[in-house]
Image: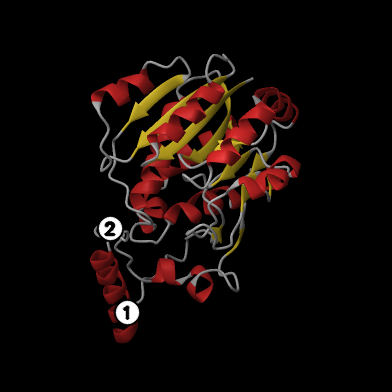
Amino acid sequence: MKQAILITAYKNYSHLVEIINFFDNVDDFSIYIHYDKKSKLSLEEVNRIKTRKVVSHFSQKYKVNWGSFNHLRCILYLAKEALKDKENEYFHLISGHDFPTKNKDYFKDYFSQNQLNNYLDNFEVPKMGWANNGGLDRLEYYNFYDLFNAKVPKQKGRIKMIFRFQKKIGLKRSFSSKFPKLYGGSTWWSLNRSCLNYVKDYSKINKKVLNRFKFTLCSEEFYFQTVIMNSPFKDSVMNNNLRYIDWSARNGNNPSVLDHSDFLNLTNHESIFARKFEYPFSNSLLIMLKKSII
C-alpha cells in the first residue's frame, strides 16, 4: 500500500531534508511539499529536493502567514496533487517541524491493517476552554491573518486592534442556517483515500462552506473536522491523530520544542509523528530517534 506524506513547510530546510531522507528509496511512499512562497530558497536547494526519488511534488504556490486561510488552501492543494496518483491509498499531513517516531515497516504494517480508519483529532465547537469563546471568536469576527503577518509585532498589533474594534461596535459574522455543525481539532491528520477524496470533492461542490472559513484564525483547525464529522465517514474516525505534541511552553515555544528529555515518551507513545523539532534544542533528540527507527 503506497502512502503519501503531505508537508507544509516554511523554514528549517535541513530538517525537511531529514524527513525526505527517512522516506526516500522506498517505493511505498511519496512526498508532496508546499514551501511558503515568502521563504527564500536557492535554485540549488529547490533542485536538491525536486530530484529526490521520493518527492513527487514541490511548490511555493501560496504566501502562508501563521493562522491564515492560505494554509488551508495549500493543504487542499497538496491533497489534490497527491490524489492524482491512483496508487496513493493513505495520506499523512505533517509540517516541516515534524519527524516520524516509528520505522517504515511499522507505517506499512499499521496502515495496511487499519486502512479503513481515519485518524483525526476532533471535538464539537464551541468547546469550553478552547481558544476564546470556545473557539467561536475565530469564526464570528474577521481575523486578517492573510493580510497581516502575525509574526511581525506591528502587524500583529493591527490584527488585534481590528479584532477589538469589531467587538466594541458589536459586529459579528453570521452563519447560514444550512451551515454544517462546527467541529475543531488539531491541524495534522492521517486519512485514507476515500475520506480525503470526499473532502476534495466537497470543497469543489460546496464553495460557500469553504469560503466562509476565510478570515478565520487557523481555519485548518476547523475545516477538515467540520467536513468529515458531518459526512458518511464520521463513524470511521478515530479521535486520535497519532501525533506526539507537548502542549506546554518549553524551549521558547508553545507547543513545546522537543529535546532529548522527550525521547522515552516518544518511543513509548502510539504516535507515528512528533513535533516540534527546532534547533539547537532538538539536535540530540533527532540523533537518538534516528538511531532507534532507521
Badge 2 amino acid: Asn
Residue at mark 2: 149
Evaluate whether residue 241 shows in this view: no
Which numbered mark, 1 or 2, is in the foreground of this view?
2
Residue 261 spot, x, y in % from top left? 65, 49
Label 1 Cα neighbours within 10 Å, binned few <14 / some 14-19 / many ≥20: few
Of 19 and 218, the residue lying toward us: 19
Residue under the point 48% across and 25% down: 20
Give the percent coordinates (x, y) of residue 169: 29, 85
Q: In this view, does 101 lie above or below 238?
A: above
Q: How far across and down, in percent of the image, does residue 235 sit? A: 70, 46
Reading the image, the residue beneath label 1 is 164
Q: Judge by depth and name the residue closer to the eye, 130 or 98.
A: 98
* Direction from residue 19 to residue 241 in the image, left or right: right
Q: Residue at x 73, y 42 (%)?
A: 270
The C terminus appears in which quarter of the rendering? top right
